[in-house]
Image (cartoon, rainbow, N blue to C red):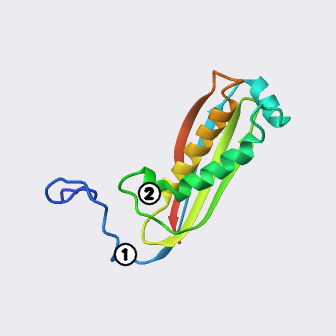
């Protein structure tokens, strides 16, 4: 069996960014999600737009988009990518907010880290903006949903 080498390490074991220069440019897409669990009373305030910090979903959407664009600055060995599109959507239930993100590019490497970063920062932004009314919130299930080359 052929030994698999780690692509983020050079021959001496030092960290490096992967060389994607020889890879073809392709349309790439990834989606991710995270869930913020809240008290039912917090969700009621959210639905009535009655939280003290204003429109938390709009702010979290912008934060998620910004985060996707800044992924390479946050995660040391990620490539800087020219993003074609980012979406951040929310599904609100009686006790949680599910964050759903998608990112697409025309590039040489995948965008799952950008989708995950968008979901996590959107969740953290919601947490930050609602923590004054709910100290029991918690974030779970951060994960990649889809990663494809087209």
Q: Secondary structure beneath disc 1? A: loop
Instruction: Check residue 87 in the rendering and tell me which mark sits there, or answer none.
Output: none
**Furthest-right residue in this view:** 48
* Residue 127 relative to residue 21: left or right: right
130 lies above or below 60: above
Q: Secondary structure beneath disc 2? A: helix
Q: Is residue 149 visible to the viewer in this orientation of the structure?
A: yes
The percent position of residue 35, horizontal first and vertical second, equals 62, 37
Give me the residue at 59% from left, 38% from top.
Answer: 124
Instruction: Check residue 23 in the rendering and tell me which mark sits there, or answer none.
Output: 1
Front tag of 1 and 2? 2
Give me the residue at 19% from left, 59% from top.
Answer: 10
121 lies above or below 65: above
The percent position of residue 28, horizontal first and vertical second, equals 52, 68
Quadrant location, the N terminus = bottom left
**Viewer-nearest residue: 80 or 113:** 80
**Furthest-front residue in this view:** 53
Q: In which quarter of the view is residue 120 placed? A: top right
The residue wearing badge 2 is 72
Q: Tell me which numbered mark, 1 or 2, is placed earlier along the sequence.
A: 1
The percent position of residue 50, horizontal first and vertical second, equals 83, 32
* Residue 124 relative to residue 111: left or right: right
41 lies above or below 18: above
The percent position of residue 90, horizontal first and vertical second, equals 71, 46
124 lies above or below 110: above
Q: CA distance from mark 1 to mark 2?
A: 19 Å
**Viewer-nearest residue: 131 or 3:** 131
Q: In which quarter of the view is residue 91 placed? A: top right
**Furthest-left residue in this view:** 12
């Amino acid at each position: 069996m052929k030994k698999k080498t780690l692509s983020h390490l050079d021959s001496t074991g030092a960290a490096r960014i992967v060389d994607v220069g020889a890879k073809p440019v392709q349309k790439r897409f990834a989606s991710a999600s995270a869930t913020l669990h809240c008290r039912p009373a917090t969700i009621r305030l959210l639905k009535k737009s009655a939280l003290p910090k204003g429109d938390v979903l709009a702010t979290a959407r912008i934060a998620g988009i910004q985060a996707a664009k800044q992924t390479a600055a946050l995660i040391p060995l990620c490539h800087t990518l020219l993003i074609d599109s980012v979406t951040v959507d929310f599904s609100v239930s009686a006790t949680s907010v599910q964050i759903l993100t998608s990112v697409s590019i025309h590039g040489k490497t995948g965008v799952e880290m950008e989708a995950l970063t968008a979901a996590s920062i959107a969740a953290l932004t919601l947490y930050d903006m609602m923590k004054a009314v709910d100290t029991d919130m918690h974030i779970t299930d951060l994960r990649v949903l889809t990663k494809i080359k087209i």
